[in-house]
Each structure stands twice: as C-alpha cells, then as structure tokens.
Amino acid sequence: MRILVVEDDPVSRKLLQKTLEGWGYEIITAENGQKALDIIMNENLKFVVADWMMPVMDGLTLCRMLRSSKDKGYVYFIMLTGKDKKEDIIEGLKAGVDDYVVKPFDRSELQVRVRAGERILTLEKELTAKNESLQRLNVKLEELVRLDTLTGAGNRLSFYETIEKTHHRACRYAYGYGIIMCDIDNFKLYNDTYGHLAGDNILRRVADSIKSSIRMSDDVFRYGGEEMVITLPDQDMKTTLTVAEKIRDGIESMGIEHRGTAIGILTISCGVAAFDMEKLENKWEDILENADKALYRAKSTGKNRVCS
C-alpha cells in the first residue's frame, strides 16, 4: 500500500518515511498541503499521514478539501501533530480526520493506527467491488427480465415498453412506424413430428433469421408461442411490406425440412400494419390489431405469405 506523508520539517518527514518503509509501505512525500492535494488529485492515493501545522496549506485544510471532493473516493487520513488538547482533537475529527497521533510519535502506536487504517481501506475496497458487482448483476437482471430466454428476442413486457415509446414519438414528431406479426406455419405439427426440442431449436433459428433481416433500429419480440412481432420505426406500409417479404423469404430460403407442409419445408406467414400519421387518434393497440388481422388473413389464404 502507498502512503502519502505530508510534513514541512525535512527531518520529521525523513523519519516518518523511513519508519513506514520499514513496515513495508511505499511512501510518497510532500512538504505542504497544497502539494499533497495536487499529488492526490493526480494519483490513486488512499492513505495520508499529515502534519497539522504547515505553510501554504495546513493539514486540517487539506483534510477538509479531501472530504469535500467526490472525485477520488475515500481517503484515510491520520493527523500527526503536537496539538494534544481535547478541543484540538475534536476540531480535527470534525474536519474529517480518521485518526490522531501526537508528536513526537510513538512507533508502536503509529504502527497500530496505520495497520487499522489499512484494514479499513481494504474493507472499503472489498465493499466497493461488491457494490460494483451487484450493480452489474442488477443491469443484467433488468436485461433478462425483458428477454425471451429461448430465442434471445425481447419478451412481451419489452414489446409493450418499446411500442409505447415508438408510438409516442410517432405522434409527437409525425413519424410513421410499421408492425409485422409473424407466425410459423403448422408449428404444432412440427413439434408433433420432430419433437419439442427440435421445435425450440426452430424458434431460435427463426428469431435469428428475423434479426438478420432487419435494421439495428428495428426490434423483434417473441409475442407468444411461435408468434413473433417486429417494430420498425420511421417506416410506412410500403417499406414495412418489403421488410416482411424479406423476412418470409429468409425463412423459406433456409430450407428447413417440415413434412407437414405442402412444399415440405418450414415457412412463416406475416401480417403487416402501419401507423397512419393522418389518424393520430389511433392507438398502438389498433395498429397491432390490424397486423394480427392481416396475419389471420395470411394464414387462412394459404400460408407462407405476407398480407396487410
């Protein structure tokens, strides 16, 4: 551990340096509080042993400056001084001093207090690391809450949050957006024929294919069962239909065997709807319902097609 020794008297400074180095610490020195503050601001120093009475900036002012700064985290501060009156000690503690050693210092007493400070800093470091780890876990948990664990697409909760924001922006800034609802054709029959594990694998492959067919600004969600929904900001009906056809063709082009279909491979059907900027009274639920109706039409008129 590195310790900053702040002492204006060169003899006392050298004595402190040699003593602390003898206990295995790496020592950096400064002759006043201002130079010490500059060092602390530029280096990751967490432990200071400082004299009270110094020119330019005394130890008490240095401590107050450190306590008022939030940039460097916590710095353990031992005040080393000839002031030993009760009111002096109280003044130092009020300023934020962690510990107090009277000069001329007793080596054993100083060692005990420095070791105590080292333990506190070690605990503080461990606590900080645990808090950072907890924050990362919380962020990961927030992500998982909004993801479908099977496909890696967003889940229904994530869809509701996204579509609310998309619709609000569309209304506020007169943007369009499209919605595509996709459904794997004869998926129950696929599960019955090839097994549910194979069906899970197909869901993942379909989700991956959809992701590769859309823009970074678009989002795909598993809406339920084998049904996927895609949101496309800043798109109209024409461009949304184009994307839906690209998605449908991408699935068909994979050539996944499905003996339960007329063409013998896995296909999907898509229903498309778009927000009409001339009808701001429409809610996003209306757009979603239109996409669902279009999907029903695609399924009922032969499947493996896109309808609006």
Image: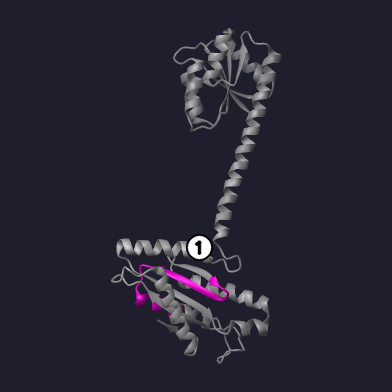
- Can you say whether 3 is above or below 195 in the image? above
Q: Would you identify the image quadrant in which residue 151 lies?
A: bottom right
Q: Left or right of 61: which side holds 152?
A: right
Q: Is residue 202 visible?
A: yes
What segment carries the magenta color?
223-246
Q: Residue at point 68% right, 11% down?
A: 106
State the residue in front, 71 or 278: 278
* In magenta stretch: residue 256: no
Closest to the observer, 108 or 262: 262
Q: Residue 3: give x, y in percent of width and height.
A: 60, 24
The picture places residue 136, in percent across and down from the top left corner, at 58, 49
Relative placement, left or right, of 83 versus 65 is: right
Q: Which residue is under mark 1?
A: 158
Q: Amino acid at mark 1?
A: Ser
Residue 235 in magenta stretch: yes
The furthest residue to the left: 278
Q: Say which residue appears at 65% left-offset and 21% top-offset.
A: 114
Q: Quadrant of residue 184?
A: bottom right
Quadrant location of residue 265? bottom right
Nearer the observer, 178 or 83: 178
Considering only vertical position in the picture, is 125 above or below 233?
above
Q: Residues within 10 Å of mark 1 (few under 14, many from 20)?
A: many
Q: Kindly identify the residue that appears in the image at 49 percent across and 30 percent down.
A: 42
Q: Residue 211: x and y, percent?
A: 50, 70
Which x, y percent locates residue 224? Answer: 55, 72
Is residue 234 positioned above or below 194 on the image? above
Q: Residue at x 55, y 30 (%)?
A: 74
Report the side of 284 relative to 44 (left or right): left
Q: Is residue 31 visible?
A: no
Residue situated furthest bottom in the rendering = 262
